[in-house]
Amino acid sequence: MPKRITTPPPPGDEPRYLTVVHPYVLDGHCNMELPKDRQDFARWIACCIDARHLHAFFHKPSARDMVIMEVARECPQLDRLLGEHRWSEFLRNPSQPEKDQVSRVFYCTYSTGRQVKKNNWKRIFVEDAWFKTWSPNNHFIAFPYPETHFCDVPIEDQTNHPMCRPLPGTVKPPPPESLTASGSVVGSSEWISGRLLPAPVAKPAGAWGKGAPKTLVLVGNARKAAIATSAPQISGVKKQPAVGGGPIAVKASV
């Protein structure tokens, strides 16, 4: 049987792939099957980076609140994309429900477009017509676009492949209060040394870890003998040997 041909490595100009959790659209509920939601999403991203650097994005029916972006590797504004986008900050006139919502952008765990498509993500190419009569300085989104914030990776479904990588500290450093609470930054020398400590030896479970039993369980004739010897003596009753061994109580004749 012929050996399977090895998959070639990605080229040097392979685009970058970023995961967007809860992407923004004008009506607040993203559905990439709708052309208007596709256009709204692309325009929102174009407020952060130059529209020519956004090549395409991917969506999947089983991940309705998540989108994967394909961005040019030479894009110099990735730090404006990564992190937490608070709707109350980048919208000019947010409604009351929108003020509590955020969108988060992380590096995707897939590093090539081949991996994304292999896992059944549908690709949508960005259209130039979406930006013909549009400007980053518009009535909906603040201009210039506000800076994003540090955020942790979301809690994802354990049955699916994780899609988000932690934000690099050099691009989005965590706030000082989170550093104090956690004690060490993920990836630092303190964090690595803490993970290399030997795990405590657990005590064996079951009877072997509990020591000798507190009470003895008697079986067979030994149990019968213990019951007979521990029983109180009754006046007027004499003991005779029982069938099979051991004493039994028999009432004396008058």
Image (tube, rainbow, N blue to C red):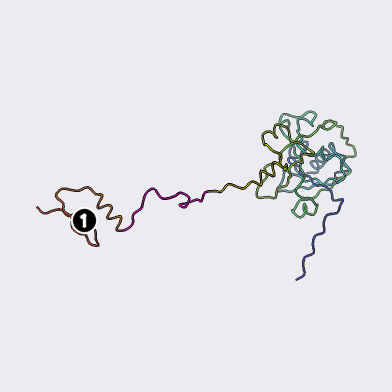
Residue at 62% in and 48% down = 198
Tell me which corner region of the image, top left, top right, bottom left or bottom right, holds residue 90.
top right
Tell me which corner region of the image, top left, top right, bottom left or bottom right, holds residue 82.
top right
Residue 193 located left or right of residue 78: left
Residue at 60% in and 47% down = 199
Question: Does the magenta portion include 217?
Answer: yes
The residue that label 1 is drawn on is 248
Residue at 15% in and 48% down = 235
Is residue 250 positioned above or below 24 on the image?
below
Which secondary structure, mark 1? strand
Residue toward you, 55 or 216? 216
Residue 24: where, in percent of width, then height?
A: 77, 38
Give, as a three-letter code, the residue at label 1: Ile
Tell me which corner region of the image, top left, top right, bottom left or bottom right, holds residue 253.
bottom left
Residue 139: where, in percent of width, then height?
A: 84, 30
Residue 153: where, in percent of width, then height?
A: 71, 41
Q: Residue furthest left?
A: 254
Question: Which stretch did the figure color magenta?
Answer: 203-220
Which class describes the residues within 10 Å of circle 1: few (<14), some (14-19), or many (20+)? few
Is residue 173 positioned above or below 4 on the image?
above
Quadrant assignment for the N terminus: bottom right
Q: Residue furthest right?
A: 132
